[in-house]
Image: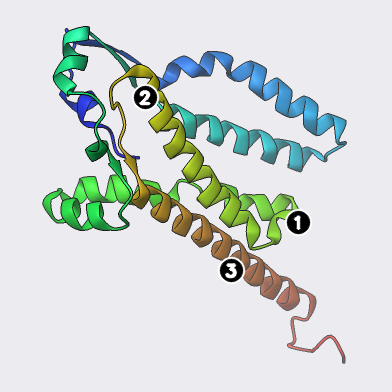
Amino acid sequence: MCVGHLTDRLTDEEAVLVPGSSIWVAWPAVAGAVCYWQWRRRASWPRMLAALALATYGWWVCSVAFFPFPLPSTSAVERAGGLGLHYVNLVPIRELVRHLPRLPWQQVVRQFGGNVLLFVPFTLAGPIFWPRLRSWRWPLVAGLGGSVTIEALQLVLSLVAGYPYRQTDIDDVIVNTCGAFLGYAAFFAVRAAVGRVRRRARYPDGQSETV
């Protein structure tokens, strides 16, 4: 999720930046709700801890996807010139081709790699603890659905605020979804590796199960 142009150009005198750490004030209530929900479902301790860990990670994703949120002065908003369609990219790959060659490799790794890995914890750990999430629909829901939701909310917040604090980009949706399927593939790779280790431990002499 690319940082919008207005946030990049604002100075300390023009805006107050609301940090992502501000939403962690509500985290104890969220954690309590997750634990209570798992307790009502009589989940095992490993599943309860996994749900709490994924919820914590999801909360962190919110803190970086929607924050820092600028509260600029009227002059800064006017200088931004309104939202404009140039803050919304619906042409796949166009912005990647345009900007990646110009960026330092450190920024490419941080931004592109971060988008690839954003949903990997959900699609890698989710199927481990919840077998119902082993369908191919899970990475589609987590990656595509989650990314579209984030981009849509960023656009809505920009519309409500009256200035483009983040850029809505279809490329982020594509990269996030590919990363979600990468985590899903990693789950099957890990499961296959664990299965081989267990078979070797059970049959150390190379005997087959049918012998």
Where does the N terminus fall, quadrant-wise?
top left
Residues packed near mark 2 inside 10 Å, few (<14), some (14 to 19) or many (20 plus)? some
Is residue 157 left or right of 32 when viewed as pictured?
left
Is residue 45 left or right of 175 when viewed as pictured?
right
Q: Residue at x 74, y 51 (%)?
A: 130
Label of residue 131 in the image: 1
Label 3: which secondary element = helix
User: Residue tagged by mark 2?
Assistant: 159
Mark 1 vs 3, N-terminal side: 1
User: Residue tagged by mark 3?
Assistant: 189
Distance between the Cα atoms at labels 1 and 3?
A: 15 Å
Q: Nearer the viewer, residue 135 or 42?
A: 135
Q: Residue at x 29, y 58 (%)?
A: 93
With respect to residue 93, does 200 lie above or below?
A: below
With respect to residue 125, does 154 lie above or below?
A: above
- Name the amino acid type tagged 2: Leu
Distance between the Cα atoms at labels 3 and 2?
A: 43 Å
Q: Residue at the bottom extreme?
A: 211
Mark 2 vs 1, N-terminal side: 1
Q: Position of residue 188 (x, y in %)?
A: 62, 67
Q: Quadrant of residue 19?
A: top left
With respect to residue 65, does 73 lie above or below?
A: above
Q: Residue at x 74, y 81 (%)?
A: 204
